[in-house]
Amino acid sequence: MCAGSHLANRELYTAFIRLFLGFHVLPPKEAKDRPVLDALECNAVPTSLTTDPKAFKCGFKARDGKKLEKWMAESEERTRGLREDVKL
């Protein structure tokens, strides 16, 4: 098992919680962009050992625009120095 899997799961949990608290998730505008929910038909690579879902679309609408702007500003402030340290 990957040594970083627990950290990865916690990071994903945090990301999903933030998405669902901050946004309403909306269905796609066109039927062709909907996700495939059938367990056998959803895999983009049918011969793969793991499921790689076929591409789909969805929309996001802020639940509270002012709160979202506040969260983004706080995040920007906390991570400001990180981008300056990265050398391309």
Image (tube, rainbow, N blue to C red):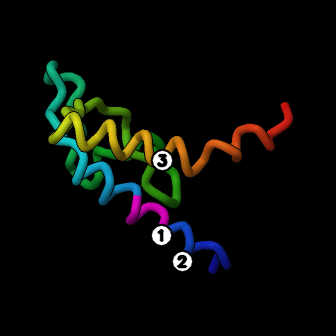
Residue tagged 3: 75
Amino acid at circle 1: Asn
Instruction: Look at 24% across and 46% down and name the residue there.
Output: 22
- What segment carries the magenta color? 9-14
Is 12 positioned to the left or the right of 28 in the image? Answer: right
Q: Residues within 10 Å of mark 1 (few under 14, many from 20)?
A: few
Residue projecting furthest to the right: 87
Q: Nearer the viewer, residue 71 or 6?
A: 71
Amino acid at circle 3: Ser
Looking at the rendered image, the disc whose residue lies closer to the viewer, 1 or 3, is: 3
Q: Majority secondary structure of the magenta segment?
A: helix
Instruction: Identify the image quadrant of residue 32.
Output: top left
Between the residue at mark 1 and the residue at mark 3, the CA separation in whole angstroms equals 21 Å
Q: Secondary structure at mark 2?
A: helix
Q: Secondary structure at mark 3?
A: helix
Instruction: Look at 49% across and 64% down and name the residue there.
Output: 11
Using the image, tell me which numbered label, if any, was put on residue 6.
Answer: 2
Between the residue at mark 2 and the residue at mark 1, the CA separation in whole angstroms equals 5 Å
Q: Earlier in the sequence, mark 3 or mark 2?
A: 2
Q: Earlier in the sequence, mark 1 or mark 3?
A: 1
Q: Are marks 2 and 1 in contact (CB under 8 Å)?
A: yes
Q: How many marks?
A: 3
Residue projecting furthest to the top: 30
Residue tagged 1: 9
Q: Nearer the viewer, residue 79 or 13?
A: 79
Is 36 positioned to the left or the right of 80 in the image? Answer: left
